[in-house]
Amino acid sequence: MNVERLTEIIGADFFTGVPDSQLKALCDHLFQKYQTDPRHHVIGANEGSCAAMAAGYHLATGKTPVVYMQNSGQGNMINPTASLLSDKVYGIPCIFIIGWRGEPGIHDEPQHVYQGEVTLKLLEDMDIAAFVIDKDTTEDMARHKMEEFGKLLEKGKCVAFVVRKGALRYDKKAVYKNRHLMKREEIIRHVAQVSGEDPIVSTTGKASRELFEIREEKGQGHGYDFLTVGSMGHASSIAAGIAFQKPDKKIWCLDGDGAALMHMGAMAVIGAGRPDNLVHIVMNNEAHETVGGMPTAAAKADLPGIARACGYDRAVTVEDYESLDRELQKAKSGKSLTFIEVKCAIGAREDLGRPTTTPLQNKQWFMECLKE
């Protein structure tokens, strides 16, 4: 189904969400049409804050907003949906558009399998009427369903369109880029070189895939690395949990800008605990690259300034490999809670593979290395 026709049928003029590869057609269309004009399109930090912003839009205008997300984001949006939007509370209508990763019967990555199984059940439990859009969905079918949804929205209820893989198309192509030159895979290679046998916790998306391939290329094992293939935004908390319990080990966290923004409160908690053996590295390409490349708010945020305000002992930005190596060596030899923002380009190898080990194997090997 053409995504432009779907948005016309929905009839909304405000969209907020967290990008998803399954919804790339929608994301590209919204970016082409609105860019990031906050009156019409806000790329949020996490799905819960998007639901809250949608509520603010409705309070200000009386109109119905749209919140888009990958189904992995349902967990973030459940609380504001149940305790704010619900017709049993404030009765704020909202249309959700949800990319269905891990759909039963469709091969997907391990972190998406269980989420895919419970996607529709979660919506049912929250009393959100859902309609699944697939490749055979016609405009007439979507229009008829939207008419049904309209009656529910008038009662202050929420509704959802759940989008199967390949169901939406967009004939134009959005181009996302920044001015930075450093490549993320090369940045990770430098970190792996300096960290040696220290444990690394890497964030979800291409960063973990690149770390895995670097270990393969060097003929190294994967026990030093915990690949956070799911739970976006939580790699730094995982790393901090390890650092608090293993004070004699240097712990490295490879984070992304979108992930760091998603649960930025973690930085305040880490700063308060002040683990002097933790090195928090945020590779900032100012984009949700793994799911298509839409921009994040990190382009305008002073991440090192935020880290210092949260209690990190040292916080810097680097934009070239020489500066990166210098800061990595300082972090390796020093004993202070460190934050390194690395400005990097958007882009990855076309032939970038995926981990060939299971999450359970990864966990077991990593725990064995932590014991040593």
Image (cartoon, rainbow, N blue to C red):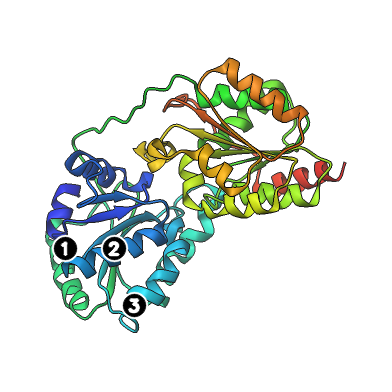
**Element at label 2:** helix
Above or below, comparing residue 242 to residue 131 in the picture: above
- Give the spatial CA distance, label 1 vs label 3: 26 Å
> What residue is drawn where x is 13% and y is 71%?
147
Residue that label 3 marks: 86
Label 2 crowding class (10 Å Cα cut-off): few <14, some 14-19, many 20+?
Answer: many
Answer left or right for 210 relative to 85: right
Residue that label 2 marks: 54
Say if residue 131 shows up in the picture. no
Total numbered badges shown on the rendered structure: 3
Residue type (three-letter) at the residue carrying disc 1: Met
Looking at the picture, how far across and down is residue 94, in whole percent?
26, 68
> What residue is drawn where x is 52% and y is 44%?
306
Looking at the picture, how far across and down is residue 307, in whole percent?
56, 43
Residue that label 1 marks: 141
Quarter containing the C terminus? top right
Q: Nearer the viewer, residue 281 or 348?
A: 281
Above or below, comparing residue 54 to residue 179 in the picture: below
Question: Looking at this rendering, what residue extends furthest in the bottom direction?
Answer: 88
Residue type (three-letter) at the residue carrying disc 2: Ala
Say if residue 156 shows up in the picture. yes
Q: Nearer the viewer, residue 114 or 104?
A: 114
> What residue is drawn where x is 20% and y is 52%?
39
Looking at the picture, how far across and down is residue 97, in whole percent?
30, 58
Say which label, 1 or 3, has the lower sequence index: 3
Say which label, 2 or 3, has the lower sequence index: 2
**Element at label 3:** loop
- Give the spatial CA distance, label 1 vs label 2: 26 Å
Looking at the picture, how far across and down is residue 341, in whole percent?
54, 32
Residue type (three-letter) at the residue carrying disc 3: Ser
